Amino acid sequence: MTVTTQHDPPSAAHPPPGDAEPDPADLGAMFDAYARDLLRYAGRRVGEQVAEDVVAQTFLIAYEQRHRHDATRGPMLPWLYGICGNLLRRHQRTEVRALRAVAAAQPHAADEDAPDARSAERVDAQRTVARVATTLAKLPRRQREVLLLFAVAELEYAEIAQALGIPLGSVQSALHRARTKIKSALAAPGGPR
């Protein structure tokens, strides 16, 4: 995805720590500063092709709703993650289907003969991926979103709360429940050794 803008070169668009964030009215600067983070997050959830569309829509919505961003409530990136998360919810079926496909594909690969230790480790890893993918697909939407914002986007609890528009306590609770379910799935009989 390429965006042509009339502003300073990309190196000037990434504010050094402590400098002001890009102006929400400068779509190009916002894109240069935050597109990579949003693409990484969305790509891991719905695949690269859909992620590019979601991120493009995120920036268009952010630009259209730039008057809603309140810098006193926090940095711009969690606000953008919130918009991106709303768009990803529309693609939730795609995400759940992808997780189920990963889970369904792994047992076939895991049934192969394991003649050596490396093959056995690969089989164990494939089974682990299948268990995690199945569990992620079954998580309630909020728990899955909180877990993915924490683990994939590497947001802090307060940033997740801001991105999803929920209280900090709800973030902590949802993350705890999601982690517990993932740990239970991994510890279930037949799980990784």
Image: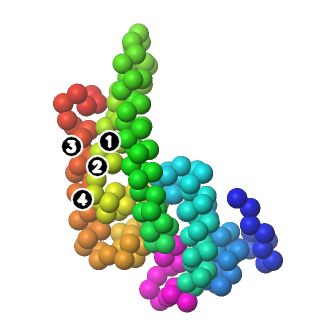
Q: CA distance from mark 3 to mark 2?
A: 13 Å
Q: Is residue 68 left or right of residue 175?
A: right
Residue 157: x and y, percent? Answer: 35, 69
Mark 4 or mark 1, which is nearer the start of the sequence? 1
Q: Which mark is residue 61?
A: none
Query: Magenta: predominant secondary structure element?
Result: helix
**What SS does tag 1 mark?**
helix
Residue 186: x and y, percent? Answer: 26, 38
> Crowding near pointer 4: few (<14 within 10 Å), some, many (20+)?
some
Q: Which residues are magenta?
A: 67-80
Asked whether the beta carbons under mark 1 and mark 2 sit within 8 Å of each other, the answer is: yes
Q: CA distance from mark 1 to mark 3?
A: 12 Å
* Of the pair 148 and 60, the residue shown nearer to us: 60
Q: Is residue 2 visible to the viewer in this orientation of the structure?
A: yes
User: Residue 105 in magenta?
Assistant: no
Q: Residue at x 48, y 76 (%)?
A: 79
Q: How many marks?
A: 4
Q: Disc 1 marks which amino acid?
A: Thr
Q: Which mark is residue 176?
A: 4
Q: In what quadrant of the picture does the N terminus appear?
A: bottom right
Q: Disc 3 marks which amino acid?
A: Ser
The residue tagged 1 is 134
Mark 2 or mark 3, which is nearer the start of the sequence? 2
Mark 4 or mark 3, which is nearer the start of the sequence? 4
Q: Is residue 32 above or below residue 191?
A: below
**What SS does tag 4 mark?**
helix
Front disc: 3 or 2: 2
Q: Residue furthest left?
A: 189
Q: Is residue 8 above or below residue 95?
A: below
**What SS does tag 3 mark?**
helix
Residue 31: x and y, percent? Answer: 65, 70
Front disc: 2 or 4: 2
